[in-house]
Each structure stands twice: as C-alpha cells, then as structure tokens.
Image: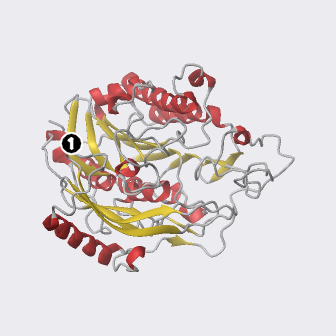
Amino acid sequence: MRDKTDKPNVILINCDDLGYGDIGCYGSDINSTPHIDRMAGEGLKLTDFYMASPVCSPSRAAMLTGCYPQRVGIPAVLMPTSEIGLNPEEETISSVLHDNGYRTKLIGKWHLGDQPEFLPTRHGFDEYFGLPYSNDHGRMVPNPDDDVPRRGYITPLPLMRDEEVVQQQPSQEGLTERYTEDAIRFMRENRDEPFFMYFAHMHVHRPILVSRRFTDVSQNGRYGAAVEAIDWSVGSILHELSNLGIEENTIVIFTSDNGSNGNLGGSNNPLRGFKGTTWEGGMRLPFIIRWVGQIPPGTISASIATSLDILPTLANITGSNLEGRRYIDGENIEPLVFQQQESLLHKPFFYYLQDVLCAVRYRNWKLHVARAEHTRNRTGGYKSKSPLDTETVLELYDLSTDMHEDYNVAESNPSIVAELSDMIDLCRTDLGDDHTHTQGINRRPPGRVSNPVPLCEYDPDNPVLWAEYDLDEFG
C-alpha cells in the first residue's frame, strides 16, 4: 500500500471542448489515441464523471476550487479585460499544494481573469506559460461581408510567461509542442521535489490549428489531428516520467472542461447534447487517473464523481491541510480511486448553465426543471455574462437504462420527482437560480477591479503579429 506520508507529484491534464466520445477508450473509432488509451489501461477510468459547468471559465473555477461556480462567483465565461476574476482569497489545488511544499506550474489556458490580481501566479502557481483565455480571443481582420462580426476591435492574443506577455498572437499550429517541451523541462528541473503541474490544452477549442505532423495522418480532419496532438503530448509526458524514474511517484489525471461543440468532427456519443447544454453531453466527460503501483490497472467504474472532488481527494492523498479553510462542495473519493468501492452518487449533483439551475442527478435519476440556451449576440460586443432563454420543464430520466435521455418517466415516478425537487429547492436557497429569481445565501464574491486594462495593445508595425485564424472556419 502507498505511504500516506509521501508527497506524490500530481499532473492534471485538462482538455478544452474534448467530448465524451472523442478518445478511443471511450468509444471513438476515428481518432487515434493510443497513449491515452494506455493510460486508462494502467489506471482507473470513470464512466460517470462530471464537470460543474458546460462552458470553460466556470468549469475551470469549479475544478480548481472544489466549489460550484456559483459559490465562487464565476458562473459564466470571462472575456478579455473582464472586471471580474477568480477571487485571490479562494483556495485552489495549486495554492493548497503550494502551501504543502509543492513546486507548482500552469501550462496552457487559464481563463479565470486576465487582470494582474487574477493571474495564475496569484493563485498558488510558481510558474505560468500559456494563454490567459480562449484561443479564439485574439485579433481578427474585420470582414464587412461576414454574417458573424470578426474581432478586429480587440487586442492580439497574448502568450504569457508568468505575468509578462512574451508574444502576441503566437502561431497556434506549434503551440502544443511548445507547451509539451515546457512541461518536460519543468519535470526535469523538479524531479527531486514534489511538483504539481496543471497542463490545460488549447485543443480542441476552435479555431483548430494543428501541426502538419498530425493533420497529414488524421482520419477526422483537423479535429482528429488536434485530438491526436493531445494524445502525443500525453505520451511524451508519460515517457518522460518513466525516463526520470518518477512514474511510480506521480499521479496523472486526464479530463476535459466540457463537452464537444457537436460540430467540426467532435463527438459526445453516446450522450445527448453538447457544450453549453445541461444534457449529459455537455457535462459528462472522460476521466482517467493513473498512479503506477497504487491504482489497480485496467479498472473501469460507473461510480459517480465530479470535478469538485479533485481538490479534497488530492489534498488528502498528499497530506495537505484543508482544515479551517473555506467551505467546498467536493468530497474525498479515495475509496473509489484506490479500492474501487462501488457507490452511487455520494450527494446530489446539480447542473447549472450560468446562474440557471437546470437539473439534478441523484443515484441513477436525473430531473430536469429548466431548459436554458444561450442567445446569440451578433453585434460583437464582449460581455462577461450573456443572456439566456429559459423555459420550465419537468423531465425525469433513468440514466442507468437511458443515458441518452430519450424517455421522460416523470409521470410514472411521482415520488422520485418529489424527492429530487426538494433537492433542487435546497440548492436554489444555497446557490441561487436566475430562472426562479432566487438569490442564494451562500455565494461568495468574485475578485473585482474597477478599471480593467488589456494585457497588450495592437501594434500594426509588430512583425510577429499574424491573425492566422482568419483562415479558419469561424462562427
């Protein structure tokens, strides 16, 4: 058995918009993912793992803090120069492990605020290399004939090293290779001390721009090439762990922030829905955890877990203290990880889109009470929170037999509907619900600045600036 006093390294790999059905070990027969599949064969794969939001900023806030996005004040996607960001007073995986002597690094996408007060280096990360928000939030050439206004009015996409912009609008085709090189360097430099590395891929968020080494062999266009670039990166990291002789003292986690967009070649099969929805396809994601010698290999579990559980579980494994800290929603799931103790959902899981409480899952049952959809803004303005169209529904699904959510059985199960409706009411009181105009009594404020400024300014004379994704299909 593992030594509870040990401090294993932790590598958390989080993809962007990668769907449930996009990798081989979750059913894809079109994307080649041998390294991720091998990782699943050497560890634990969960079939019922959930992120706490179907869009990126709130999903990432929840995973890092162990709290629902509504509790920490990040319910919607943040845009460049947003006046809000993740409050520096919130505890994160990085700050908790950093306090326990870990060297910490974020590589890739942050998307929890681009003002100095909100950057990764203010949240327990010793080092940062990556993009502070989504890879489509860069400058584009205005096209008056476009149905969708292009972003010619914003600043270039900034690539950052710690708190400094080191390049404007970097070439995205080679960015995954640059990230992976940086990851390997960090691992080599810290092989003799405990480290936490959060590797947040830009793939497969659009625009999908990938090196030819992957597009030339992909059977699924640029989307498949991006998935295979992720797989190559995972394989490179696992290979380096072996070379350094530290794979038996390193936990590696692989997951994604939300479901696929449902176009461009992505797949959430066999689930219904896609990114931005509270159907299963928007929020149920791949989750693989590998720790050689500690987690039994080739294990598959249908027990339910969520991204909220990652922080308390890692804190307990590493001996990091959570006592006296702020309330979190997640729970320690070590019995599931190490002993595969099968259990149904330890407590209700709530599905939010922005601040609309849409559904709850408890055990095998899922009750939808609201249907929310984004309204499309065609005028081009950036907002930290876009409006939603919502409607009241009452739909009950038995996910053990109907994971695609096709058969509403609410009418024949009134006692189940009543039980789950009571859970919904308690959550509304706790975290709020815009659809019923409920404020929520246990929400904490985000960080806020009064005069946000862009990270960089457009310079037409800068020779490195190239809006390469003007070439991409963009919508």
Residue 182, percent from left and from top: 54, 35
Q: Residue furthest front?
A: 411
Q: Across the whole image, how many numbered discs are drawn on residues?
A: 1
Figure quadrant of the N terminus: top left
In this picture, residue 446 sits left or right of residue 141: left
Given residues 202 and 65, the one toward you in this image is 202
Given residues 154 and 402, the one toward you in this image is 402
Residue 148, percent from left and from top: 69, 53
In this picture, residue 365 sits left or right of residue 62: left
Q: Residue 89: tell me if it is visible.
A: no
**What residue appears at the point 31 percent right and 46 percent down from the top-left corner?**
404
Residue 264, percent from left and from top: 55, 38
Q: Residue 445: tell me if it is visible.
A: yes
Tag 1's secondary structure?
A: strand
Relative to 63, does residue 341 appear above or below in the rendering?
above
Q: Residue furthest top?
A: 217
Image-quadrant location for residue 255 = top left
Given residues 181 and 104, the one toward you in this image is 181
The residue beneath circle 1 is 302
Relative to 20, does residue 211 appear above or below in the rendering?
above
**Looking at numbered disc 1 in the image, what kind of residue is underneath it?**
Ala
**What residue appears at the point 62 percent right and 35 percent down from the top-left corner?**
209
State the colouring used for the structure image.
Answer: secondary structure
Q: Residue furthest right?
A: 461
Relative to 230, does residue 75 appear above or below in the rendering?
below
Residue 219, percent from left and from top: 51, 23
In this picture, residue 252 sits left or right of residue 456: left
